[in-house]
Structure formats: structure tokens, C-alpha cells
Image (cartoon, grey):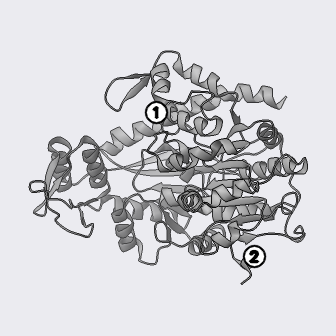
Amino acid sequence: MQVTKSKFTTTRKKPLKQSAEPWTPDAEQLAGVKWLVERSAAALLLDPGAGKTSITYAAAALLKKKKMLHGLLVVAPLRPATQTWPAERDKWLDFNHLSVCVLHGKYKDQLAAQRHDVYVINYEGLDWLINSGTLAELLRKKWIDVLVFDELTKMKNASKKAMRRKLLTPYLHRFARRWGLTGSPASSGLMNLFGQIGILDMGRCFGPYITHFRFKFFTQISEYKYVMKPGAEDLIYETIKPVALRLELPPSVKLPAFRENDIYIELPPAARRIYDEMEQEMLAILDKEVLSAPTAGAVYGKCCQLASGAVFLSNIDPVTGEPLRNKREWREVHEEKLDAVEDLIDELQGQQLLLAYWYEHDLERLLERLGKDTPYIGAGVSIKKAQAYEAAWNAKELPLLLGHPSSMGHGLNLQYSNARHVGWYTVTPDYELYDQYNRRLRRRGNKANTVTAHRFIAKGTVEAWGNMRALQRKAGEQTDLFNALRIYAKTIKK
């Protein structure tokens, strides 16, 4: 068996010459290369489309040429790992002499036994990589000495019980360099910077203990809630300047403007009764079924579902604690959002719409209303099918594409059809997923003047007063971080 023929092996004996082109970096990208080359711990905070993959390849190629690098281990979400990293290497003449392999699929053991310049693995594959002894072997052979986290926010959990961190921590010191790439470092608040920066500099900026970090910068006001101490925000920005560089697209690159169009719906009386009971009493009756939520967080989740039109039934009897059912069942509560989606599709008159769903019952109900053959990218959809949908969308062959933000937030380029409409059937309070999903369209290469996010919101529900406020607050915190680093970035580029 010739392992090098695996679809995840991208070894090149000679540089590509047919479709590849020279890499012509702008000033921002050159600053990014310089930042990585000069640091053992470095974070690049880049907008989607700013070229984080090519910047990393350029830094690696330069260090390798100077005999200062053995090889890279890149940890990335699944789609960027299997699609973006091999494709970007093939795209540029400057990098396609590098041997790149993706450690995914049935041939990963054989691939890891071969010498490559770049090994790419998805975050879920870390368990195999470490527990199989593969990582230790790659380090022992000195085939890798640089660790790269694509979408660094995946390492924001600084708990000792966090599996990814627990697995990697014993090996961090064996990498000469640790680099992190992300566009949304503070999407859930500045506290998440501790885990992201710490995995790169091993505690030099903030120290080794999150308890000390919290005590220094935050005041605890409840069991799980912290607020910033006066002046702490600016101090955090100042502390991470030696590690983190904010890179923006150059002025010559004009992205579409971004606007949000909130489409409000009213809950029908029956749905409103159920919603109010759940919000106020933590218990509601739906078609003789008891809906219960034992905690405030569970109530919030149930209310979000009810606002979107359906709700999962309880699997546990609230009185006896006995299992009620094996399968996760749901019941429909109203169709107001489905009607609003159809109205928007009619209004767009064939213009492309990238529609985000959140819950399983969102998808099932949308497919029932819009057609079972409506394409979607989410759980259970293969990489091959997702690639086919991506190509069809960019060729303007799909007027509608459904997608889950967790599955589509990274690694898909959907801007080449110049589409300008994103829809949010259920709006997530997770700013990183919200921002990244919108940026599947609002990125370099889209010639549309404006990208509009149409957000379907039920009046008088947690969607209106909870999710919207959460997005606004988290967007503000991240913007403040970027602004603080922007001035520092200008001095670096000089």
C-alpha cells in the first residue's frame, strides 16, 4: 500500500507550477511573519480572510531555510485541518515545496511514521495523538518543534480538568515555539485570555494559576460571575502586548459593510402561556407533557427553544427521577418564525440566503417547511458533501443553504458568489460563533457593498433581552481589546 496516495497526504517532490501563484504579502501580513519569527510565544489576532494560514507557512518556510525549525504540528478545527491547510499550501508557489500531511482517517498511523514538514490534526484527534505515543515519538525524532493552534479560542478553558489542556501540558516545554491564531480572542470576555495566552507562554504574562489571575483583575460577585476591577482592562491589554499582535486587513481591501436587520415575531397566546410558565415557574405543561428545568441555566435554554418554536421534552421524570424516554423527542409550539423565514425568502426573490439554525428541531422543522432536499451543513454531513455545497454556493447554484454555526464557523469560504444575506433562525449568545458565521460572507473576495444579518427574534423573550444584550456586550469587549492593540501594532510594523 502506498500511503502517500491517501487523500490526506500532500507530500510534494517538486513545487507545483500549474495553478499555484507567488505569494504577494501586504504590509500587515509581513508584520505577522516578523512577529512569529521573532517570538517563541506569539498570538496573531486576525480578521477572517487576513491570511493567517499563509502567514504561518511563510514564517515556517523562513525559519526552515535558516535551519531554525524542524517541523510544525498544527492543531485546527476539522474543516480547516482537512481542507484549508492543504489547499493554502498548494495555492502558493512559495510554500508548496513543504510536505504537509493531515493526521485524520484510517491512514493516520502510517502518515505519522513518515517525515513531513507540517503535520495537521484536528482538536478531537489530540486524544489519539498523545495517548498513542505518536506525539512523543515525533518530538523524540525531532521532526516537530513548533506547535500552532489554529483558532486559539479552542484552548480558552484553563481548568486542570480540561482534557485538551491536560493532554498537552506535559509536552509544551518541548516545543521551541508555540503560536496561536484567532480572530475572536475575547468573544466570551477577557477572562478567557488567561487560557489562550497561557498555553503559548506557559504563564509568563499572567502567571500559572487562574485563581491568581481572577484575584488580580476581577471581583467575584456570585458563584460564577465576575466583574472587572477598576483599571484592570487596560492592565490586561498592556500585559499581553509582548505576545499578541492585532492584524487587520490593509486599507486597500474593502470589505462589505455590515448591518443587522431584526425581524420581530409575536408569540401566539398558547405559546406565550407556555413560555411565561416556564420562565416564571420553571415548569410548564405542553400536550399533557411536563416541561421542567431544575436550574436557571436550564430555564434559559428551554425559553430560547420555546421562542424559536419547539422544545425538547424532558427525559427524566421531575418527581421520581426515572427515565421517561430513550430518544430525544420534541414538540412544536408555534410556527411564527417559519412563516417569517418564508416571507424573507419571498422578499429576496432568489438572492442567496445563508441561514443559521441552532437546535436539532430547528433543522428538522426548517427542512419540513422548506423541503427535505434543502442543503445544509451540520452534524452528520460529510466533509465531501460540505465541499460540494461550498462549491455550488460559490457558483451561485444554491439560493439557500442552512448551516449550524459550530460546523460552519471556520474553514468555509462562501464569499465568491458575492452573496449578501445571512439569516439567524435562532440567535446564539456566543459572539465568536455569531461573528465567524457572519464572516463566511463578509470577507475578502466578496464584492457586495453590504452584508446583512437578518435576525429572527421573538418579542418579550430571552432572545430579545438576553441573547441580544450578550452579543452586544461581548462585541464591545473584543472591540476594546483590538483597539488597545492597534496602536502597539503600528509601532511593530515600523
Residue 37, picture quadrant: top right
Q: Which mark is residue 4?
A: 2
Q: Nearer the viewer, residue 118 or 224?
A: 118
Count the numbered circles shown.
2
Q: Which mark is residue 323?
A: none
Using residue 80 as the reference point, say whether residue 320 is left or right of it. left
**As drawn, which residue projects farthest toward the top?**
230
Using residue 390 as the reference point, say whether residue 457 is left or right of it. left
Residue at disc 1, secondary structure: helix
> Residue 190, image x and y in percent?
52, 31
Quadrant of the drawing holding the N terminus = bottom right
Using residue 196 as the reference point, say whether residue 297 is left or right of it. left
- What's under tag 2, amino acid-wise? Thr
In the image, what residue occupies the spot 55% across and 69% down?
399
> Residue 416, image x and y in percent?
68, 62
In the image, what residue occupies the spot 59% across and 35% down?
198
Q: Is residue 243 above or below residue 331?
A: above
Residue at disc 2, secondary structure: helix
Residue of label 1: 473
- Does residue 285 appear in this view? yes
Q: Is residue 107 above or below residue 196?
A: below
- Does residue 414 appear in this view? no
> Residue 102, image x and y in percent?
67, 65
Disc 2/disc 1 C-alpha distance (Å): 49 Å
Quadrant of the drawing holding the C terminus = top right
- Nearer-N-terminus badge (2/1): 2
- What's under tag 1, amino acid-wise? Arg
Q: Nearer the viewer, residue 359 or 8?
A: 8
In the image, what residue occupies the spot 23% across and 69% down?
326
> Residue 471, image x and y in percent?
45, 39
